[in-house]
Image (spheres, rainbow, N blue to C red):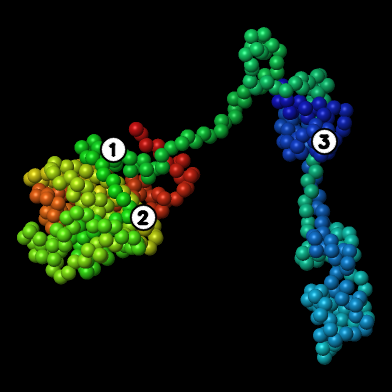
């Protein structure tokens, strides 16, 4: 029979002694009680020992119970201090009276009349007081003490372990009690010593421990996938700062300073300011009278001070326009995946921060059809087969659309906005050809791809969910 070293040690320790307490056995083996019980169970499974379990209840006094066991219950202590009668006002000076008065009345040891406490005739020692000296589990008096928080019941489990005849035979037949060797050294192999060593056996039936390798967060996997897709489609990537001044977040995108359009996305405003870029006057003129674009502009005043005020970027279009200002020459295809911030109330489909996929395509002769074509291609590659477009409005694009994809079970889902930049947006930077632009909520896309009902799942550190999510193929 194959026995582990610990099973053998149990058998060896039991030779010559009848049924043995687990504690005694543990002491004899110089091992932890829990381990010995575990090993004994393994031996019992092989029919080599018997295990007998007895559970006994024991009543133990709590700290408060111990105190009263010495000094007497509060009602007894108070009673001992009353000589026949005492005014209530006097009695309540003793802090113990708080607990004692209720019990004195309940036990009928006193009568209270007109503010005077009179000791009754029968104040004999009660069962509870006796139980305080020797609490016996199960008795009414002991239950009373438990209820008062003066005692508690603890369960005591005892194990008695004994060799079976079979176990006895094996134990007496001689046991190799040498430590099992798990790793052989070079010397042990060369010298041939390994042949006589007790080698630890493989337990073929045992399941190995699960190993979780490091991995990329499922949301990041999808973001990477989208990034790769756009690289494949010939785009380059741009980045930018989270903190933007209003000039780049709003003004350069032809959002008037006094227009509710500015509040269209509820914004996190910051106390900081950032300077305006060279050429800011052109934006001022566009807003006031259209500059030299032929537009009439919004009219009214335009304040450079308002433009300097910072916000957490509410959309990554603030990065697109800066990228265009730096790269005004066609052709250009660029994208950015960036976190944006809005003052949203958190619910399953809204978070105050989320990723946007922002894109721009600039070239001569581009038109609206190219924009719609791009979406069909892009969403198709992302696995959304049906795409449709609804008219939209953005201050910086004309025409504007809101692309939607079909999701079984959900219907048409809106994913963001797009359009062709107005000349009021592009002309100040010397751009004179069409620029297609879009901003999509990629967290939405991730959610749809993963079949999530709650957007928050993407941003929680839910390690079990992360481990259970499929790994992205590279
Ligand atoms: N910035 C818009 C999306 C958009 C980008 C570019 C052009 C048109 C629309 C939004 O955040 O919803």
Element type at mark 3:
helix
Location of residue 120 (image quadrant): bottom right
Element type at mark 2:
strand
Q: Would residue 457 appear left or right of 406 to someone viewing this image?
A: right
Q: Position of residue 353 (x, y in %)?
A: 36, 55
Farthest residue to the bottom: give it.
114
The tag on residue 11 is none
Residue at the image position 81 percent from the left and 19 percent from the top: 173
Q: Label 1: few (<14), some or many (≥20) within 10 Å?
A: few
Q: Position of residue 176 (x, y in %)?
A: 76, 20
Q: Label 3: few (<14), some or many (≥20) within 10 Å?
A: few
Point out the tag, 1 or 3, that comes first from the N-terminus. Answer: 3
Residue with the mark numbered 1: 228
Please name whichever residue, 465 or 17, is drawn nearer the observer in this view of the structure. Answer: 465
From mark 1 to mark 2, how far is it between C-alphas?
23 Å
Q: Is residue 145 visible?
A: yes
35 w.r.t. 106: above or below: above
């Amino acid at each position: 029979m194959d026995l582990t070293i610990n099973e053998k040690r149990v058998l060896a320790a039991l030779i010559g002694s009848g049924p043995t307490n687990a504690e005694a056995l543990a002491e004899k083996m110089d091992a932890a009680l829990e381990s010995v019980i575990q090993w004994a169970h393994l031996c019992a499974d092989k029919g080599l020992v018997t295990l007998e379990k007895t559970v006994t209840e024991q009543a133990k006094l709590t700290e408060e119970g111990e105190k009263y066991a010495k000094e007497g219950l509060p009602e007894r202590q108070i009673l001992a201090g009353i000589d026949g009668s005492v005014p209530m006002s006097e009695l309540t000076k003793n802090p113990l009276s708080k607990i004692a008065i209720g019990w004195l009345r309940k036990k009928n040891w006193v009568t209270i009349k007109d503010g005077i406490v009179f000791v009754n005739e029968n104040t004999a020692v009660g069962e509870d007081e006796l139980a305080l000296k020797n609490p016996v589990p199960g008795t009414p008096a002991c239950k009373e003490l438990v209820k008062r928080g003066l005692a508690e019941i603890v369960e005591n489990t005892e194990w008695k372990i004994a060799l079976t005849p079979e176990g006895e035979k094996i134990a007496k037949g001689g046991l190799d009690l040498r430590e099992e060797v798990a790793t052989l050294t070079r010397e042990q192999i060369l010298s041939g010593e390994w042949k006589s060593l007790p080698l630890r056996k493989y337990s073929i039936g045992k399941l190995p421990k699960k190993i979780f390798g490091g991995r990329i967060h499922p949301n990041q996997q999808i973001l990477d996938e989208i990034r790769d897709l756009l690289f494949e489609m010939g785009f380059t990537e741009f980045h930018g700062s989270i903190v933007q001044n209003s000039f780049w977040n709003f003004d350069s995108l032809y959002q008037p300073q006094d227009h509710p359009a500015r509040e269209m996305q509820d914004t996190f405003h910051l106390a900081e300011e950032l300077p305006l870029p060279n050429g800011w006057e052109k934006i001022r003129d566009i807003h006031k009278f259209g500059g030299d674009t032929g537009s009439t502009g919004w009219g009214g005043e335009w304040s450079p001070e308002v433009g300097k005020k910072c916000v957490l970027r509410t959309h990554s279009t603030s990065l697109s326009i800066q990228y265009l200002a730096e790269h005004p020459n066609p052709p250009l295809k660029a994208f950015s995946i960036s976190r944006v911030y809005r003052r949203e109330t958190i619910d399953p489909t809204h978070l105050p921060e989320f990723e946007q996929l922002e894109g721009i395509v600039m070239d001569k002769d581009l038109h609206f059809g190219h924009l719609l074509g791009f979406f069909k291609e892009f969403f198709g590659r992302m696995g959304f087969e049906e795409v449709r477009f609804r008219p939209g409005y953005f201050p910086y694009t004309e025409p504007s659309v809101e692309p939607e994809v079909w999701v079984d079970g959900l219907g048409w889902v809106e994913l963001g906005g797009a359009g062709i930049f107005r000349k009021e947006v592009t002309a100040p930077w010397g751009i004179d050809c069409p620029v297609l632009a879009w901003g999509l909520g990629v967290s939405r896309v991730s959610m749809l791809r993963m079949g999530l009902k709650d957007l928050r799942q993407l941003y929680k550190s839910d390690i079990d969910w992360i481990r259970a999510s499929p790994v992205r193929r590279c």
